[in-house]
Image (spheres, grey):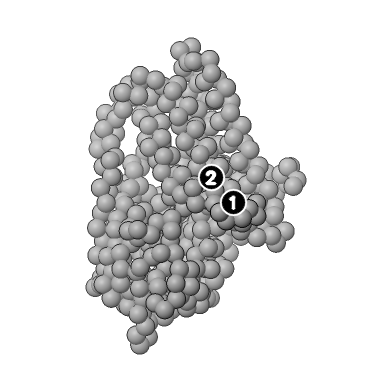
Amino acid sequence: MDLTFTERENAFRAECRAWLERHVPKESLGSGDTREGFARHLEWERELFDAGWAAVSWPKEYGGREASLFEWLIFEEEYYRAGAPNRVTQNGIFLLAPTLFEFGTEEQKARILRPMARGDVTWGQGWSEPNAGSDLASLRSTARRVEGGWLLSGQKTWCTRGAFCDMAYGLFRTDPAQKRHHGLTYFMFPLHGEGVTVRGVDRLDGDEGFAELFLDELFVPDRDVIGEVNQGWYVAMATTSSERGLTLRSPGRFMATASRLVDLYGRYRASAEPALRDAVIDAWIDAEAYRWYTFQTVTHMVDGQDVGASSSLNKVFWSEMDVRTHETALALIGDRLELDIDHDAPESAGDAVDEGAWMRGFEFALAGPIYAGTNEIQRNIIAERVLGLPRK
């Protein structure tokens, strides 16, 4: 792996840094998991798209810049360095889109990708079900063949921002005679209209974006099947590889968090326990290590290698690093944690440290070892498929 950046890459960094410094909103857009915040984030997503920054590595015909994966990583570093808003289009751009590029038809790509990148059509992930979370192969939702398409029935849960999204994607059993990973098909389906009910899931922080999806013979045309019928598991594994390994959690996010932690330590070092100095250093080193590991992953991908099961290594590392980093921040803040803000009235921040962002970040980080496949499951995958250890 070459650790130096080319002239083109340095010029790309300078260009995106300059644009972001001019255009990143100066005021918070609010939580993208509230209806009002989601709408404000979509306005930002459209500004990104109009300037060619929404999906920089995509072909120009779909609204991209045809940037390399290395340049995409550079953009992500600059995006989070600038304090830009979290992307509410991530379930489409970072998860479904790579799957469409690999398995989708030309008609599907032409129809779906540009509206996705601009935020005109937003996407939720309809995978998990009651009693079928990390063990996704035990799902019970079904799709029944009819003329011209399929009737989808069942329940999906933990659909991130599903309360606001237009469309979703997920696995359904199309051959009940087959078991587990076989007989599944990957569908795209609407979240509005006859046959679908979207119900919000209450959260402790009061945000309303999570949703349960109830499908009762929802008609989906054949054109919204991704890949081959009954081969959906293999398509889904491409999505999970993107989710765990590269696109969902780029290093730029954690580098920015580590930099904020260093700044926090500088402000509160006088009252900090001596051991916290080492914890802050470890957090910064971990973020840098993750950065270069990801550049190594992209190097392998450019050379034609498949990320495969090694994406589980990535997922365990970034999710647990995120928790440790925020735990260190909370230890630095100490009793000041009591000075939080009212989530419904951000102007009430008062003397809260960084407007309560560290506690909110910690609460979200705790979910990291669970979503995208629990880390317990990821360790099994690492043991069996990366290390070649026998099943017990």
Does residue 177 appear left or right of residue 203 in this picture?
A: right
Q: Residue at x 35, y 47 (%)?
A: 32
Which residue occupies the extreme top position in the image? 270
Find residue 242 and report its horizontal and vertical position in percent: 54, 57
For numbered disc 1, what is the local secondary structure?
A: helix
Residue 298 sits above or below residue 195 on the image: above
Does residue 200 appear left or right of residue 327 in this picture?
A: left
Q: Which mark is residue 316?
A: 2
The residue under label 1 is 382
Q: Residue at x 43, y 61 (%)?
A: 136
Assess whether mark 2 and mark 1 are in contact (beta carbons under 8 angstroms).
yes
Which label lies toward us, 1 or 2?
1
- Quadrant where the C terminus lies? bottom right
Residue 122 figure quarter? bottom left
Find residue 34 and report its horizontal and vertical position in percent: 29, 47
For numbered disc 2, what is the local secondary structure?
A: helix
Q: Is residue 147 visible?
A: yes
- Look at label 1 and name its amino acid: Ile
Q: Choose between 156 and 346: the one closer to the eye.
A: 156
Q: Distance between the Cα atoms at labels 1 and 2? A: 10 Å
Find residue 305 and report its horizontal and vertical position in percent: 69, 60
Residue 238 sits above or below residue 291 on the image: below
Label 1 or label 2, whichever comes before in sequence order? 2
Q: Residue at x 74, y 42 (%)?
A: 4
